[in-house]
Amino acid sequence: MPVLVFIEFTNGKINESSCQATTLANGQGDEVYGVTTSTDKNYNSTLGLKGFDKIFMINDFKNIECLSKIILDHDIKIIISPGSDLFREISSLISISHKFSIVSNVKKILDHKTAITTVYTGKVESEVNVINEKIIYLINKNIIESDTYDKNTDIIKIESKNLRINYEILEETKIDHDISLSDADIVVSAGRGLKGPENWKMIEDLAKKLHAATACSKPVSDAGWRSHHEHVGQTGLKISPKIYFAIGISGAIQHLAGVNSSKIIIVINNDPDAPFFKSADYGIVGDAFEIIPKILKALN
């Protein structure tokens, strides 16, 4: 039974969330097919190392005609995908068109029809049993380590003349970050304890030293200190890095809802009663303006 994986690329390379989805797919099906909008045939042909038997190249993920052709021609009944906003939307369209059930926030796939998911912003795990034979699994980030494989990958281009675009791009903003916040294994985040945007250089310096992405709390983005695309929390991005630094953030439940699935949480705060310490794996009580320079010096 073939399993289809939606592939996300970051800076021209398959991202880790897609690699983890592929590793899961290799445990569920005889063959693993990937679908991508990447036009780099040379790079796509190397994806056998990531576990793909076939790669389908399409012009747009919202081209349901192309996706339908892949699903019908190859009798796809299981789709495994990173749980990004784009693929949540695409999964909804496929569910309507081809009657797939959707299981989101997947932490582990036990068999073809059973998965462990997280609910209540990661506080509870639930075992989900699906009756429908056609299922889309949307996985959380960093639930497993991705494997490498030795496969020869076939590249197949799917053409379509009827791309239906139901959206309009009003503005594009280029984000000059080396590491995407959604893909980062390490995230350095700060809050109002930084006192102002002029003090963010030490956060950026720490992120560079750790090869990390930067983030912020909602009050910081609301105040205009940092861009809204860095806001993590219940009303912002929900991330699952391997290490999350919370610097000068009190740890309100709305913020925790976006980061509590992080593998390790490190809190730096001068208030020993800050709620974030209850969720921290490691905590430092002290002034960030004294602690961060010492960490930077130790990393030199």
Image (cartoon, helix red, strand yellow):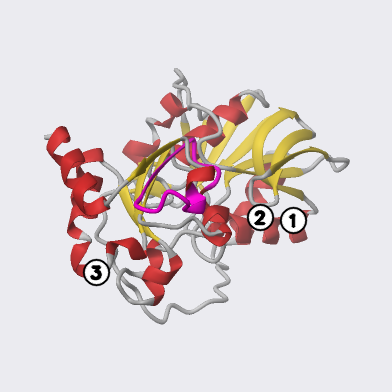
Residue for badge 2: 91
C-beta proximity under 8 Å, tags 2 and 3: no
Q: Amino acid at mark 3?
A: Pro
Q: Residue at x 56, y 33 (%)?
A: 143
The CA distance from mark 3 to mark 1 is 44 Å
Q: What amino acid is found at the position of numbered circle 1 in the picture?
A: Ser
- Please identify the residue farthest to the right as the structure is shown: 131
Q: Nearer the viewer, residue 178 or 66?
A: 178
- Where disc 3 sits, the SS reads helix
- Mark 3 Cα-neighbour bin, 10 Å: few <14, some 14–19, many ≥20: few
What range is drawn magenta here? 260-276
Residue 153 located within the stretch drawn in magenta = no
Residue 269 belongs to the span the image colors magenta:
yes
**Label 1: few (<14), some or many (≥20) within 10 Å?**
some
Residue receiving disc 3:
197
What residue is drawn where x is 57% and y is 40%? 5
Residues at discs 1 and 2 in contact (Cβ within 8 Å): yes
Residue 73, picture quadrant: top right
Q: Position of residue 249 (x, y in %)?
A: 41, 57
Q: Label for residue 279?
A: none
Label whose residue precedes the other's in the sequence (3 or 1):
1
| Residue 63 horizontal/vertical position (percent) | 57, 62
| Front residue (pair 292, 287) | 287
Q: CA distance from mark 2 to mark 3?
A: 39 Å
Expressed as whole percent of the image width and height from the top left, the position of residue 79 reads 66, 41
